[in-house]
C-alpha cells in the first residue's frame, strides 16, 4: 500500500471516531476554562423562568427550556507526533413550546434575559406558523414536576482536570509501544465530553445535571511488504460514562482468554502491546472457508450487532416511519408488537432498555424533556414486548407515561427520541466462555467490532470484527481472517443457543450514534455476556464473486 493511500484511509477511519460537525460543538477555548464551574444554578433558574413565563404570555400551553454548557476535548496523536488538540466550549439556550397544538423551537447563544425572552417569543411564533399546516395536535403524555433536583455522573476524577500534556504523553507512549512492536502506523486519541445541562418546564421541574463521558482509542497497522497487504487492530476499549479513572485499571478489571479484554477499567498500554502482536497473527492467519459456523461472540463485538439489529429497530419513530435517516425504518412494525407473540429471538433472548446503568454512555437521571429515567423490557423471553418512546409518542402504544429517552446533542438542537442503553441480559445459568467453546464442534470466536452493513428495515445484515479464532472440536485452533457473517435479524437472534452468566457481562458502545435530519449525535452503551449463535452463514470478504 502506498503511503498516501494509507493516509487517506487513516483519515477516513479516524473521521469515523469524531463527532459529526465537531467544530459546531463549540468555540475553541483554553483548556483551563474547563475548570470553571460555569453559571450559578440560581441564575439559571431565573433565566429559565423568563423563558417559561414569556412563552406562556404569548400563548404557549407547554414550554421547556434547556440551558446547556458543553465542553469537548479531543487529543489526537499519530506515531511520534501530536496531530491535533481541540478544546471547545458551547453555551446557550434552547426553548421548545407547544402553541395551537404544534411544536415550536428557537435557540440563542446570547444568554441574557432579553435574548431569552425574544427566543421564547420566536419559538411560539414558529409553533403558531406550524399550526396552519398541521391537522393533528401534539398529544403529550402527562409528566409531574420534580421541583429543584440534580443528578451527576458518579465519577472519581473529571478528565478535564488531567493536563493535556499527560494525555499526550499517554498517547505517545501507546504509539511508541506499537512502533517498537513493528507497527508501520499507529494513531491514538482521547475524547472527553462534559454536558452541563439545566432543564426547566411548565410542568414545574428545574433539573440540573452534570454528565461526563470518555473515549480512549487507538488503531495499529502493519504492512506485509511482500504482498502489499495490511492488517489493523483497534483498541478493545469501550467508550464510557465515567471520568479519567477509567484509565486506572487493576488486575480485577482484566478478562483473560485468547487476548485480554477489559471490564469497568481499561489498560491502554497493555492493550496496544497485545494489538500489535494480534496484527502479526492476522497477517499470517488462514483465510476463512465460507460456510455455516457456530459463532461465539465476545461483548466487545456483540454490542454493535445489538445496536444495529435490536436497538435501532425498536425505536418507535423508525417503526412508524417518522424517521428514516441513517439506515432507514424498522421491520418491527406495530402489528408484530400487537400480536404479543412475535418471536424476535430464542427464549434465551432478553433485551432491556436502561437509562440508569452505571458506567454507561447513556446514563442520566432525567431525559431532555424532564422525565425521570428508568429501565424497561424490549424483548422478553424472545418475544417483542415494547419499543422506545417519548412524551408525544407514548399514546401511540397505549402508554400513559414517557419512557424517558428524549435527547438533543446541544442546546441549539431540538430534542427527539434517541436510543437509551439497550443490552442483552446475561444467562441465568452458570456458564463460562471456556464451557461454551468446548461444546462447539465447528465455530468461530469473534472479538472486537469491525465493519457492518444493514438494510433499510434493519432486517438483513452483515458484520465483521477485529480478531477471529477458529474453533475445532471444542478448542481454539488458531486465527482466521477475512471473516464476516450474514443473517437476517429474526433468524440470527432465534439461533441464539447459549449466553454466559453475569460474571462475563461487559459494556461496549457508540460515542457518536447518528440520527435525524439535520443529523445529531448520541452516545449509548450496549452490554452483554459472551453469546453463541448456531449455524450462521460466514462469508470470505477477500474473495470476489
Image (cartoon, rainbow, N blue to C red):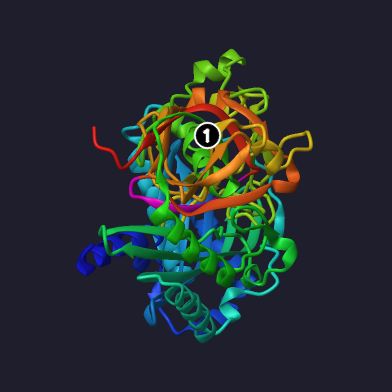
Q: Residue at x 42, y 65 (%)?
A: 220
**Residue 301 appearing in the image:** yes
Q: Is residue 155 above or below residue 445?
A: below
Q: Residue at x 44, y 70 (%)?
A: 188
Q: Which element carries disc 1, helix, strand or loop? A: helix
Foreground: 390 or 104? 390
Residue 447 % position (x, y):
53, 49
Screen quadrant of the C terminus: top left
Foreground: 129 or 170? 170
The answer to if 221 sits in the magenta stretch is: no
Residue 303 % position (x, y):
55, 45
The span picked out in magenta is 517-527
- Residue wearing tag 1: 310
18 to the left or right of 264: left
Residue 199 % position (x, y):
58, 58
524 to the left or right of 143: left
The quadrant in which residue 302 appears is top right
Screen quadrant of the N terminus: bottom left
Q: Is residue 355 above or below residue 222?
A: above
Tally the marks: 1
Foreground: 338 or 133? 338
Foreground: 496 or 69? 496
The answer to if 525 sits in the magenta stretch is: yes
Q: Residue at x 40, y 59 (%)?
A: 232
**Residue 193 appearing in the image:** no
Q: Residue at x 58, y 24 (%)?
A: 345
Crowd class of label 1 (few under 14; some 14 to 19; many from 20; radius 10 Å)? many
447 to the left or right of 132: right
Magenta stretch mostly in which secondary structure?
strand
Amino acid at each position: 500500500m502506498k503511503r498516501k493511500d494509507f493516509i487517506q484511509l487513516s483519515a477516513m477511519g479516524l473521521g469515523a471516531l469524531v463527532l459529526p460537525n465537531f467544530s459546531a460543538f463549540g468555540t475553541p477555548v483554553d483548556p483551563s476554562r474547563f475548570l470553571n464551574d460555569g453559571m450559578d444554578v440560581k441564575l439559571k433558574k431565573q433565566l429559565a423562568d423568563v423563558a417559561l413565563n414569556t412563552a406562556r404570555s404569548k400563548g404557549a400551553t407547554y414550554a421547556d427550556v434547556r440551558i446547556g454548557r458543553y465542553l469537548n476535548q479531543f487529543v489526537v496523536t499519530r506515531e511520534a507526533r501530536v496531530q491535533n488538540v481541540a478544546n471547545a466550549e458551547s453555551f446557550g439556550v434552547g426553548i421548545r413550546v407547544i402553541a395551537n397544538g404544534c411544536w415550536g423551537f428557537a435557540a440563542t447563544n446570547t444568554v441574557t434575559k432579553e435574548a431569552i425572552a425574544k427566543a421564547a417569543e420566536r419559538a411560539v411564533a414558529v409553533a403558531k406558523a406550524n399550526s396552519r399546516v398541521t391537522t393533528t395536535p401534539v398529544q403529550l403524555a402527562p409528566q409531574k414536576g420534580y421541583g429543584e433536583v440534580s443528578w451527576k455522573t458518579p465519577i472519581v476524577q473529571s478528565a478535564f482536570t488531567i493536563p493535556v500534556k499527560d494525555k499526550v504523553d499517554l498517547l505517545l507512549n501507546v504509539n511508541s509501544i506499537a512502533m517498537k512492536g513493528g507497527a508501520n502506523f499507529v494513531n491514538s486519541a482521547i475524547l472527553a465530553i462534559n454536558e452541563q445541562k439545566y432543564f426547566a418546564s411548565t410542568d414545574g421541574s428545574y433539573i440540573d445535571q452534570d454528565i461526563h463521558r470518555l473515549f480512549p482509542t487507538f488503531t495499529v497497522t502493519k504492512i506485509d511488504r511482500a504482498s502489499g497487504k495490511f492488517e489493523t487492530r483497534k483498541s478493545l476499549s469501550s467508550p464510557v460514562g465515567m471520568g479519567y479513572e477509567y484509565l486506572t485499571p487493576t488486575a480485577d478489571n482484566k478478562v483473560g482468554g485468547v487476548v485480554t479484554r477489559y471490564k469497568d477499567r481499561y489498560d491502554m498500554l497493555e492493550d496496544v502491546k497485545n494489538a500489535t502482536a494480534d496484527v502479526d497473527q492476522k497477517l499470517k492467519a488462514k483465510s476463512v472457508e465460507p460456510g455455516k459456523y457456530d459463532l461465539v461472540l465476545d461483548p466487545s463485538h456483540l454490542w454493535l450487532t445489538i445496536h444495529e439489529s435490536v436497538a435501532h429497530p425498536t425505536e418507535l419513530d423508525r417503526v412508524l416511519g417518522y424517521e428514516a435517516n441513517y439506515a432507514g425504518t424498522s421491520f418491527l412494525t406495530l402489528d408484530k408488537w400487537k400480536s404479543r407473540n412475535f418471536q424476535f429471538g430464542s427464549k434465551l433472548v432478553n433485551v432491556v432498555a436502561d437509562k440508569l446503568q452505571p458506567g454507561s454512555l447513556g446514563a442520566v437521571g432525567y431525559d431532555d424533556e424532564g422525565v425521570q429515567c428508568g429501565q424497561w423490557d424490549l424483548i422478553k423471553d424472545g418475544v417483542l414486548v415494547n419499543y422506545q418512546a417519548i412524551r408525544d409518542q407514548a399514546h401511540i402504544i397505549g402508554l400513559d407515561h414517557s419512557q424517558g429517552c428524549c435527547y438533543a446533542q446541544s442546546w441549539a438542537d431540538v430534542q427527539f427520541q434517541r436510543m437509551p442503553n439497550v443490552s442483552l441480559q446475561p444467562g441465568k445459568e452458570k456458564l463460562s466462555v471456556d464451557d461454551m467453546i468446548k461444546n462447539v464442534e465447528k465455530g468461530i470466536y469473534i472479538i472486537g467490532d469491525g465493519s457492518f452493513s444493514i438494510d433499510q428495515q434493519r432486517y438483513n445484515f452483515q458484520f465483521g470484527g477485529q480478531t477471529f479464532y477458529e474453533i475445532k472440536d471444542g478448542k481454539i485452533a488458531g486465527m482466521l481472517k477475512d471473516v464476516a457473517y450474514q443473517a437476517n435479524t429474526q433468524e440470527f437472534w432465534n439461533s441464539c443457543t447459549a449466553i454466559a452468566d453475569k460474571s462475563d457481562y461487559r459494556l461496549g458502545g457508540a460515542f457518536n450514534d447518528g440520527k435525524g435530519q439535520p443529523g445529531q449525535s448520541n452516545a449509548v452503551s450496549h452490554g452483554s455476556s459472551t453469546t453463541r449463535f448456531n449455524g450462521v452463514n460466514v462469508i470470505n470478504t477477500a474473495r470476489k464473486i
